[in-house]
Amino acid sequence: MKALILAGGFGKRLRPLTDERPKPLLVVGGKTILDWQIEWLKSYGITSFVITSSHLSHKIVEHLEGGEKHGVDVKIVVEEKPLGKGGAIRNCRDIIGDDDFVVTNGDVITNLEIGRLKLEGNEVAAMAIIPLRSSYGIVKLRDSKVVGFEEKPLIRDHWVNAGAYLLTKEIFGMLPEKGEIEDTAFPELASSGRLRAVKFEDRYWRSVDSMKDYEEVDSDLKNGRVY
């Protein structure tokens, strides 16, 4: 099985860190985000990778050097202009081939058990979902008295897209040449009952979108709060 890592974003909210290196090559916990991702997916037996790149793509090419440093096969697809996640997946059709494949966003640090993503019947996609985490600490009350606090709890009756998927080749015919999979293929699949959700609870998951995210993920990795 191949894994496709979507690493073509500009990382604008992480400037100036991303002025001279693409976001997937930012170092957190002593390794680049991309290295963490390859090692995570390799731990589930995936040894063939396709990586999309746009912003400062030559640096990703130089960093991976064909995959030798991880003992995996790596092919890098360079986009002259960003295609969005949907367009980027479609652009890799010839490389991916006909087998089911895993896709993940290129800014995620997680220990989700990717092998739990399964498809049944006529399903075209399986999406990893995780409980929504509050952006704020919660004040606990008993009547009008404060009885405690909980820092950024998980809100377990609401779920968010974790940016990790298992897809079949049928997805390619539903994707735009340029645009997002969340705006095109996924709503179509959801309306026809062909999009599976796989819940992951009590697993580490963070998307490195901002300087605050970057600092917190770096601290989590350095202090062993992930693996």
Image (cartoon, helix red, strand yellow):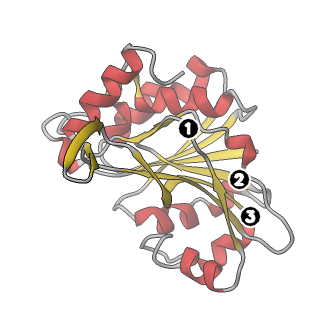
Q: Which residue is mark 2?
A: 101
Q: Identify the residue shown where x is 51% and y is 35%.
A: 110
Looking at the image, residue 114 sits to the left or right of residue 205; the answer is right
Q: Above or below — where is 193 with respect to 172?
A: below
Mark 2–mark 1 Cα distance, whole angstroms, equals: 25 Å
Kind of residue at disc 3: Thr
Q: Nearer the viewer, mark 1 or mark 3?
A: 1
The foreground one among 14 and 205 is: 205
What numbered label is drawn on residue 202?
A: 1
SS at mark 1 in the image? loop
Q: Are marks 2 and 1 in contact (CB under 8 Å)?
A: no
Is residue 222 visible to us here?
yes
What numbered label is drawn on residue 168?
A: 3
Is residue 30 visible to us here?
no
Q: Position of residue 174 (x, y in %)?
A: 61, 79
The foreground one among 217 and 40 is: 217
Q: Identify the residue shown where x is 27% and y is 37%.
A: 149
SS at mark 3 in the image? loop
Q: Identify the residue shown where x is 74% and y is 64%.
A: 168
Q: Residues within 10 Å of mark 2 (few under 14, many from 20)?
A: some
Kind of residue at disc 1: Asp
